[in-house]
Image (cartoon, coloured by chain):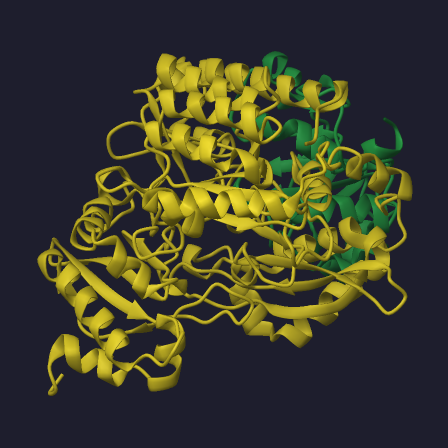
Amino acid sequence: MAQLLKDTQIIDDQWIRVPADAEVFPAGDILVHYNDWQTHQDELNQHQGAVGVWFDGNEEIEAFAESLVSLPLIAINFPKFVDGRGFSAARLLRERYGFKGELRAVGQIIRDQLFLLQRCGFNAFQFEDNIDLDQAVKSLTDFSDSYQVAVDQPQPLFKRR
Amino acid sequence: MYRYDQYDQQIVDERVAQYRDQTQRFLAGDISEEEFLPLRLQNGLYVQRLAPMLRIAVPYGLLSSNQLRKLAHISRKYDKGYVHFTTRQNIQLNWPQLEEVPDILAELASVEMHAIQTSGNCIRNTTTDQYAGVAIDEIEDPRPWCEIIRQWSTLHPEFAFLPRKFKIAVCGSEQDRAAFLLHDIGIQLVTNDQGETGFQVFVGGGLGRTPVIASLIRDFLPKQHLLTYLDAILRIYNRYGNRDNKYKARIKILVKAWTPEVFAERVEAEWAHLKGGPATLTEQEIDRVKGFFTLPDYQAVDNDSASTELQRLASDNKAFSRWLDRNTKPQKQAGYRSVSLSLKPAGVAPGDVTDRQLEVIADLADQFSFGELRSTHNQNIVLTDVLVTELYELWTAAKAAGLATPNIGTINDMICCPGGDYCSLANAKSIPVAEAIQRKFDDLDYVYDLGDLELNISGCMNACGHHHIGHIGILGVDKKGEEWYQIQIGGSASKNAALAKVLGPSLSRDAVTDSIEKLLDVYVENRQEEETFLATYQRIGIDKFKERVYGATA
């Protein structure tokens, strides 16, 4: 079973990520693409097991974010690690739409982005490559404080110094 | 100047530790080249033609003498004993070892400096006027606002992986000395009818392949909203900027595609969610930062007798008189002047300074300008707050160190990128072109007669040498593997910013200086009264210049 970082712990992934344009869904807790989730609503409502949704960071999430806030898991996919759109999408989901569930970064993320990703509201991180998660977890705490307002610290440093 | 507290110091120290770990993992093969690239770039490290190049941030161009001494030490210990000042007021080391960069960063952190975000697709160093705080035409000192932006942009969690690099400049005066309309965001300090401070916000300016002058998207942004509004602009750009083609990825392309009006609406809509939020600036924070940029302890000076004495010294000494005229400027405090130390003597790459010169400049700053100095976007050094009664002594010391070439604002004070001698992007060398021009125009009386003239040289279309906004611009191009040069004229970086026009087909390097001379001849023959080269060009147009260089049939 694949492992991932969640809330600074290394855990086994209980979720099965279903590639986009799926016609059939496996049993168990599944993570389906937003388009499939929309197309197969009725079927997924009957699904035995939990359903989460994933999409790429470039999606115009304003169009559907509200419909996702009660889900247990949303995953934002980074097609390339240098594609920073997922950082904005995450903050919008947390700060504007109040999503409280698990927000997972998936795709081509790298360890050295962990600190910034968690600041933007991600609390789970699934790497494509088989990296040493015991080592990677250290990058979550690269910095002990930051100047800006973000999901992990809603007050700017200038109000706390 | 701004001084770090424990928070600022901790962030910079932790950044050093983070980068040290990243470097070790890269050298151990645990990070791929592709993954290491943005990590090293965001710490200012390029891999260049001959060696890595490390760009060190000089926030809005302000340095202390102590910092300069540390830079001298670093250049000696880790490099070849010289540094290069860039057009964005930063400093580059041309020969550091990749393995030693973490040590260099640790040395920098010990004097409250860093290389954070001096490269890469993130928010870069915020630049401003080298005469901030002393400029006669100043509306308000821009430096506190630059520092507030520096802190906001440093390791911003959402904007570390933008479509492309992002540059912000702040202008606090009537005249623009920061080329702020040629930045991704240009901020103009203004006061409204009620006397309140605010900002005019321009977006989408830039040089490079597609030079564009920025468009106004907000006429008055009250000061407390600065950071939430910047967050809104950056979020729009981060989400909608082009990521498929790096040549179409700057914000200027998005602003053009949407139109400035639509772009402004999108920003306003995003800002509506952020406005008044926790990132809204407080009076307390604005005052805290402003408290670092107080005026030095000026002495009361008998201005009349000081001026008389200065006149006497100048009439006795032509060299001093020339320097006084070209390299010093009045400032708003009577009895004091701002002095430019020229980093453009002939035979030295424009903007290059040796370790020894850095130490001399540090000593001069301690002796004459309250221990502070500024780097300029024209790649020189400015010492402000120099007592007029001490100018002669300063000149004598600067001259001995090769820092008093009286060429500020002249054709020989060119902006020039490192070019093909160093840079792996360059199509052509630029430093030898600069040198050939300085050697050709070595008659000071002729050079002064030409008056204010901005000549800018870039070794490729990325335009680090700002060739689009030179009164005369020279662009290195590659023609079937050979280095050729395109000449442009009529650019301007002032508030009436203009982009230069291409004169004609590109020329071989040998032909460049002669062609510049022909352009100058046309100017001298056609100018009226006190007209500058630019003003003459604007009046008579490009044709006469073109004919002289290429012949009537061209």
Q: Nearer the viewer, residue A142 or B537?
A: B537
Image quadrant holding the C terminus of chain B, namely: bottom left
Q: Residue at x 32, y 71 (%)?
A: B489
Residue B322 location, x and y as percent? 37, 49
At x 69% / y 43%, what residue is drawn? B149
Q: Residue at x 55, y 36 (%)?
A: B389
- State the residue in front, B3 or B308: B308
- The reply, left or right, for residue B539 in relation to residue B268 is left
Question: Residue at point 37% right, 60% down?
Answer: B454
B551 is higher (above) or lower (below) than B357 = below
Quadrant occupied by the N terminus of chain B: top right
**Quadrant assignment, res B256:** bottom right
Viewer-proximal residue among B486 and B43:
B486
Q: Chain B appears what colour?
A: yellow
Q: x and y percent of residue B23 in the render? A: 46, 18
| Residue B97 visible to the viewer | yes
Image x and y of residue B336, in percent:
61, 42
- Chain identity for the colour green used in the image: A
